[in-house]
């Protein structure tokens, strides 16, 4: 049986540990399903990234959309990271986690008037604009507030990220960013926007990208725009590469952050500006697991099913992306046979599965399984479908663990609903 085993999630005497804490001990206290994160994974991953680019003046902005628990955000803030926020909710979470507003960037293709106003009120490092109409609105709001808005334009470089179409963002057919020609025109027409200071140029071509080639192509394209703007008198302070670096969920061929740095650094070194990165998945995905209890096992003809108490409302990536998460037992029994089984949840949808046709040891009711690589786009995408409560989150640091979000109660689900007698 193939086991996902790392220095952060490893087996000791055939029992899964997160760092130096037994996973079984954690779930005996908090129940299942439950998310468990390794703080030291987050720390080490961040240091690995920033050290890979130590020769280049740069700042990492943790992409809060990947995991917006305030304690996770705080872990990166304490390391010196900025934060990339995509909504008013993420902005408020980042501020609560202690982030310096001047190390926050407000992104998103559809910012509301309130979000733009809040970004200006809090004096964020910059707002990333993705359309001409948005620029006009930022300019108007800044004028009303008697402020100068620091703005970067997100350029869509029309590069195929070679990833799932739902998380590809750098093609002209995608909703994100402004095409090259239009972006150049807006930058050069800067005097039209009296209340805006253009500070940077940005891109983000997609997520879970497992080849370096799309990045080098996009960085090269964006650098050409940067130099064209510089030649025309538009001097930018930063160049934002975005995020999107793929991680290993199963058998993907990925690349190291060192190889990534080696590939794009020669281009970046030619630029006379500060480099921004916006990693999310890279920093958190393999630092988290979702633990579930087995409710039942059964056979339909020759087909095996393991029915767990975690479902698509807890982790939706397998259902909507067909995404692979390795699944393994919390306790290994070497004397048991291996079977091929679908691992499914209790939600009333055929699409409610954690994994299909997986090789796993024969399991028994009441035992536990771990859905690996669940530290990114797991809890943040959880829902209350079937009126199910969202799971708790636990952060492990060495030999201690902390419940950083409790399991929702039914009172949480019903607090703002009232029976109307009409």
Image (cartoon, helix red, strand yellow):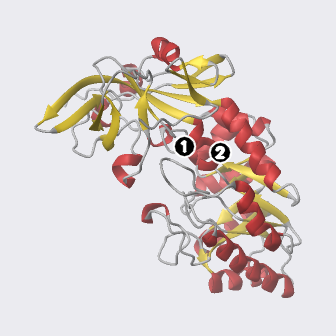
Above or below, 417 relative to 319: above
Q: Quadrant of the N terminus?
A: top left
How packed mark 1 is, by other alpha carbons closer than 10 Å (few <14, some 14-19, many 20 or more), is many
Residue 364 visible? The answer is yes
Disc assigned to residue 367: none
Query: Which residue, given by chain and number where applicable, does mark 2 sit on?
Result: 283
Cα separation, mark 2 vs mark 1, equals 8 Å
Quadrant hosting residue 199: bottom right
Quadrant hosting residue 389: top left
Query: Which residue, given by chain and number where applicable, does mark 1 sit on?
Result: 376
* Chain-order first, disc 2 or disc 1: 2
Point 23% across, 34% down: residue: 305
Left/right of residue 325 with respect to residue 133 in the rendered view: left
**Of 308 and 93, which appears nearest the observer?**
308
Above or below, 202 relative to 304: below
Point 78% across, 74% down: residue: 194
**Of 355 and 396, which appears nearest the observer?**
355
Point 27% across, 31% down: residue: 306
Point 80% across, 67% down: residue: 265
Quadrant hosting residue 74: top right
Left/right of residue 95 with respect to residue 295 in the rendered view: right
How packed mark 2 is, by other alpha carbons closer than 10 Å (few <14, some 14-19, many 20 or more), is many
Asked if disc 2 and disc 1 are in contact, CB closer than 8 Å, the reply is: yes
Left/right of residue 149 with respect to residue 373 in the rendered view: right
* View extreme (left): residue: 301
Above or below, 156 relative to 233: above
């Amino acid at each position: 049986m193939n086991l996902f085993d790392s220095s952060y999630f490893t087996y000791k005497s055939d029992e899964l540990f997160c760092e130096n804490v037994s996973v079984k001990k954690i779930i005996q206290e908090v129940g299942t399903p439950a998310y468990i994160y390794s703080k030291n994974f987050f720390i080490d991953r961040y240091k690995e990234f920033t050290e890979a680019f130590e020769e280049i003046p740069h700042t990492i902005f943790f992409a809060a959309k990947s995991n917006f628990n305030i304690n996770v955000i705080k872990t990166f803030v304490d390391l010196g990271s900025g934060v990339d926020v995509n909504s008013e909710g993420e902005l408020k979470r980042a501020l609560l986690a202690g982030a310096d507003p001047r190390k926050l960037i407000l992104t998103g293709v559809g910012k509301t008037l309130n979000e733009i106003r809040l970004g200006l009120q809090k004096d964020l490092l910059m707002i990333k604009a993705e359309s001409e109409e948005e620029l006009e609105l930022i300019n108007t709001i800044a004028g009303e507030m008697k402020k100068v808005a620091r703005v970067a334009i997100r350029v869509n470089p029309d590069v195929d990220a070679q990833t799932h179409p739902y998380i590809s963002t750098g093609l002209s057919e995608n909703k994100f960013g402004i095409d090259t020609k239009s972006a150049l025109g807006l930058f050069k027409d800067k005097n039209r926007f009296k209340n805006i200071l253009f500070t940077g140029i940005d891109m983000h071509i997609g997520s879970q990208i497992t080849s370096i080639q799309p990045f080098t192509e996009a960085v090269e394209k964006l650098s050409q725009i940067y130099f064209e703007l510089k030649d025309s008198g538009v001097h930018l302070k930063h160049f934002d590469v975005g995020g999107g670096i793929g991680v290993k969920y199963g058998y993907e061929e990925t690349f190291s952050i060192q190889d990534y740095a080696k590939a794009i650094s020669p281009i970046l070194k030619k630029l006379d500006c500060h480099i921004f990165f916006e990693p999310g998945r890279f920093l958190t995905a393999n630092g988290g697991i979702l633990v579930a209890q087995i409710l039942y096992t059964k056979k339909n003809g020759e087909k095996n099913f393991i029915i767990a108490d975690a479902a698509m409302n807890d982790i939706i990536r397998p259902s909507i992306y067909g995404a692979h998460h390795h699944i393994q037992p919390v306790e290994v029994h070497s004397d048991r046979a291996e079977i091929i089984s679908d691992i499914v949840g209790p939600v009333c949808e055929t699409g409610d599965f954690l994994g299909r046709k997986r090789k796993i040891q024969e399991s028994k009711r009441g035992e536990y399984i771990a859905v690996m690589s669940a530290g990114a786009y797991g809890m943040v995408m959880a829902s209350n479908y079937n009126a199910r409560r969202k799971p708790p989150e636990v952060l492990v640091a060495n030999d201690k663990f902390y419940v950083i979000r409790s399991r929702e109660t039914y009172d949480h689900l019903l607090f703002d609903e009232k029976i109307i007698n009409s």
